[in-house]
Image: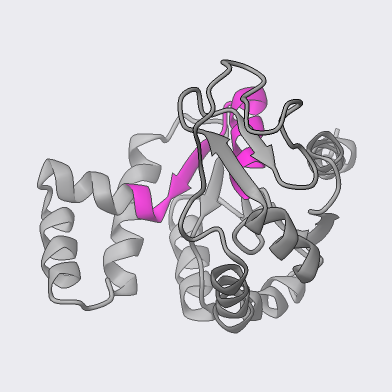
Amino acid sequence: MLILLGPPGAGKGTQAQSLMTKHGLVQLSTGDMLRAAVKVGSEIGRQADALMKAGALVPDEVVTALIEARLEFEAHAPGFIFDGYPRTRAQAESLDALLAKHGMKLDHVIELAVDEEALVDRISGRFTCAKCNEGYHDRFKPPGQEGVCDVCGSTEFKRRPDDNAETVRARLAEYRAKTAPILPYYEAKSLVARVDGMADIADVTEAIEAILASDAQTAPA
């Protein structure tokens, strides 16, 4: 059971997908779970929907209840990846209590460490083919022929409106202010490991796998 930490664009989603595919882990994304609960009209979903429509934050106890319901539903899963939670020390403490209640424990908090200016460059240069969604980058992966998609030959491309330097820097500042402060809480529990989030995707995956493999090596016989 692990938490992947890192600012937007650090590659958490890509690495979570790899872990899910290889190890059968279940990704618990609080944002996705809230939207799903609202869509199906569950009691928690109705509470969350009313709060969000009023412009209020969904309180920790509602999010915790949502996570608990998912843990119970996926009780036989080999493990979980927490995505978007916890974001504060209070949430981290609530998660510890919830896991203890169900006889579970957190094994790792893996931070994808980044060079912020390089990350701004990485994200703000991204664009995709409007037809087939093949990904490109202004500097690192331009089309072989300028203005023509390598895969489908389309000449139409698109960029996400929030993939610009100003927005990326704002996201990084928010991460530093709101999420990074939970690291000392987990460092005191010797749970934190860091990998270079700026490395090639395969190298990041290999580093995370090495961290997970250490569990098997240190497990009692």
Quadrant for residue 192, please give it. bottom right
The overriding secondary structure of the stretch rendered in magenta is: helix
Give 50 or 173, whichever is nearer the viewer: 173
List x then y, in percent, for residue 71.
40, 44
- Location of the C terminus by quadrant is top right
Relative vertical location of residue 61 with respect to residue 1 in this rendering, above or below: below
Left or right of 73 on screen, residue 219 = right
List x then y, in percent, for residue 114.
78, 63
Quadrant for residue 206, please give it. top right
Relative vertical location of residue 179 with respect to residue 39 in this rendering, above or below: below
Q: Magenta span covers which residues? A: 12-32
List x then y, in percent, for residue 67.
37, 53
In the rendered image, is residue 1 in sight? Answer: no
Give 86 or 170, whichever is nearer the viewer: 170
Left or right of 191 on screen, residue 29 = left
Residue drawn at x 43%, y 61% as measured from the top left: 98
Left or right of 196 on screen, residue 136 = left
Magenta segment includes 20: yes
